[in-house]
């Protein structure tokens, strides 16, 4: 299956919802880097799925103009693995904070590393 490359600016990957993180929050940089990466890779927004758990960093799908899933606390990685298994042509990205992914979800993080 041929991958469709698109020519969009980073801003075109941003959603219309107001970003309500605290001033100076590091998540603003992560959001900017993520949209920049999508643009540089020429990814089709319809083929991107951003998966997140709970917490401020996990609100990323709310602020992007791509498909997004807000999952259970600590379970974003296995959920993302299921999406990728169901449709390997999708670009799946996981966003989460230390409490979500490395606190409750640390076992899933280790397993994901084993599965590459």
Image: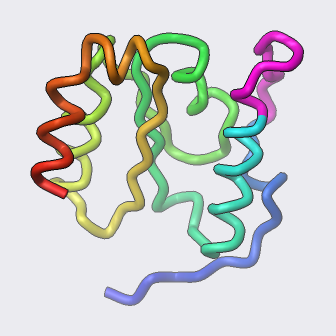
x and y percentages locating residue 9 in the rendered image: 82, 65
Snapshot quadrant of residue 24: top right
Q: In this view, does 14 lie to the left or right of 49?
A: right
Please state, as top left, top right, bottom left or bottom right, where the C terminus lies in the image: bottom left
How many numbered marks does the figure carry?
A: 0
x and y percentages locating residue 96 in the rendered image: 46, 26
Colour convention of the picture: rainbow
x and y percentages locating residue 44 in the rendered image: 57, 67
Q: Is residue 71 left or right of residue 43?
A: left
Please state, as top left, top right, bottom left or bottom right, where the N terminus lies in the image: bottom left
Q: Residue furthest right?
A: 23
> Which residue lies at the image location 77% right of the left edge and 14% below the top edge?
21
> Which residue lies at the image location 81% right of the left edge and 10% below the top edge?
22
Q: Magenta region's main secondary structure?
A: loop
Q: Is residue 90 magenta?
A: no
- The residue lying toward the viewer, choosing from 56 and 42, is 56
Vertical arrangement, residue 8 with respect to residue 65, above or below: below
> Which residue lies at the image location 23% right of the left edge and 23% below the top edge?
106
x and y percentages locating residue 55 in the rendered image: 52, 11
Vertical arrangement, residue 60 with respect to residue 114, above or below: above
Residue range (magenta): 16-28
Q: Is residue 20 magenta?
A: yes
Q: Is residue 80 left or right of residue 58?
A: left
Snapshot quadrant of residue 70: top left
- The residue lying toward the viewer, choosing from 23 and 81, is 23
> Which residue lies at the image location 66% right of the left edge and 77% below the top edge?
6
Vertical arrangement, residue 16 with respect to residue 32, above or below: above
Q: Is residue 88 left or right of residue 33?
A: left
């Amino acid at each position: 299956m041929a991958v469709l490359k698109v020519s969009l600016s980073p801003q075109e990957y941003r959603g219309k919802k107001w970003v309500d993180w605290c001033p100076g929050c590091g998540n603003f940089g992560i959001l900017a880097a993520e949209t920049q990466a999508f643009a540089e890779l020429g990814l089709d927004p319809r083929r991107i799925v951003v998966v997140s758990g709970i917490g401020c960093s996990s609100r990323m799908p709310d602020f992007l103009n791509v498909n997004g899933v807000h999952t259970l606390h600590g379970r974003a990685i296995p959920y993302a693995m299921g999406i990728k298994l169901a449709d390997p042509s999708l670009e799946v990205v996981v966003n989460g904070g230390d409490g979500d992914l490395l606190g409750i979800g640390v076992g899933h993080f280790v397993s994901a590393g084993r599965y590459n």
